Image: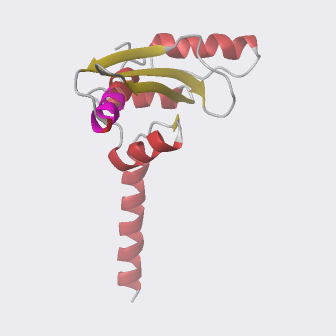
C-alpha cells in the first residue's frame, strides 16, 4: 500500500512540476473574445518569448477591438496595451493592427479579429514593458525586472 501511495504522490508531483513550467499570458478582454481565447488559446510563433517577457515584468495584456461588415467589406482593428497584472497601470504604448476582407460574413469578421489578436500580441516587446515601467515609476509603484534579451 505504501508503494502505491508513494507512486501516486510522485506522479502527482511530476505532473504539477510540468504544469508549473508552462507560461500563460494573462489578459483582459470582453466576454466574447475571452470565450474564444479559452477555446482556441493564443497561437503565434514567439509565444514563449512574449509570455516570458510579460511574466517577468508582472504584466498582462488588455485587448480591445472594433469590427464591422460594411456594404463592400469586412473590417477589423485590434488594440493591445500592456498592463500591470495587479493595478490599473498601462504602458504608454499601444500596439494596433487593422485588416479587411472582401468576404462579408460574420465568420470572416471573427477570423479577422482572431488573426489580428494573435499577430498584435506577438509584436509586444521590451519597449512596451519600458513604457509600463515609466508609468509605474511616475506612480511610485515597484518596477519589475524584465527579460534582458531583445527579440
State the quadrant of the N terminus.
Answer: bottom left
Of residue 24 and residue 101, the one placed in the foreground of this image is 101
State the quadrant of the C terminus.
Answer: top left
Q: Position of residue 35 (x, y in %)?
A: 44, 47
Q: Colour scheme of this structure image?
A: secondary structure
Of residue 47 and residue 56, the one placed in the foreground of this image is 47
Q: What's the magenta bit mostly, secondary-structure-wise? A: helix
Please report the residue visible at 45 percent of the width from the left and 36 percent of the height from the top: 25
**Based on the displayed image, in which of its 4 quarters is residue 59 positioned?**
top right
Q: Position of residue 53 (x, y in %)?
A: 45, 25
Residue 80 is left or right of residue 15, and the answer is right
Q: Residue furthest bottom?
A: 1
Q: Position of residue 79 (x, y in %)?
A: 48, 20
Q: Which residues are magenta?
A: 107-115
Q: Position of residue 11 (x, y in %)?
A: 35, 68
Q: Residue furthest front?
A: 71
Please report the residue visible at 43 percent of the width from the left and 30 percent of the height from the top: 52
Q: Residue furthest right?
A: 140
Q: Residue furthest left?
A: 103
**Based on the displayed image, in which of its 4 quarters is residue 116 positioned?**
top left
Q: Say whether residue 96 is magenta.
A: no
| Numbered circles on residues, count | 0
Please report the residue visible at 47 percent of the width from the left and 43 percent of the height from the top: 32
Q: Is residue 71 visible?
A: yes
Of residue 43 and residue 39, the one placed in the foreground of this image is 39
Please report the residue visible at 54 percent of the width from the left and 11 percent of the height from the top: 93
Amino acid at each position: 500500500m505504501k508503494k502505491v501511495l508513494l507512486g501516486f504522490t510522485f506522479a502527482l508531483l511530476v505532473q504539477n512540476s510540468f504544469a508549473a513550467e508552462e507560461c500563460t499570458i494573462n489578459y483582459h478582454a470582453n466576454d466574447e473574445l475571452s470565450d474564444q481565447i479559452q477555446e482556441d488559446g493564443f497561437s503565434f510563433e514567439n509565444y514563449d518569448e512574449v509570455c516570458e517577457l510579460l511574466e517577468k515584468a508582472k504584466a498582462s495584456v488588455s485587448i480591445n477591438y472594433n469590427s464591422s461588415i460594411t456594404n463592400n467589406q469586412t473590417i477589423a482593428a485590434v488594440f493591445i496595451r500592456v498592463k500591470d497584472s495587479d493595478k490599473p497601470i498601462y504602458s504608454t504604448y499601444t500596439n494596433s493592427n487593422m485588416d479587411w476582407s472582401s468576404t462579408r460574413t460574420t465568420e470572416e469578421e471573427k477570423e479577422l479579429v482572431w488573426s489580428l489578436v494573435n499577430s498584435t500580441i506577438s509584436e509586444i516587446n521590451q519597449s512596451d514593458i519600458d513604457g509600463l515601467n515609466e508609468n509605474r515609476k511616475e506612480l511610485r509603484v515597484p518596477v519589475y525586472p524584465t527579460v534582458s534579451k531583445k527579440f
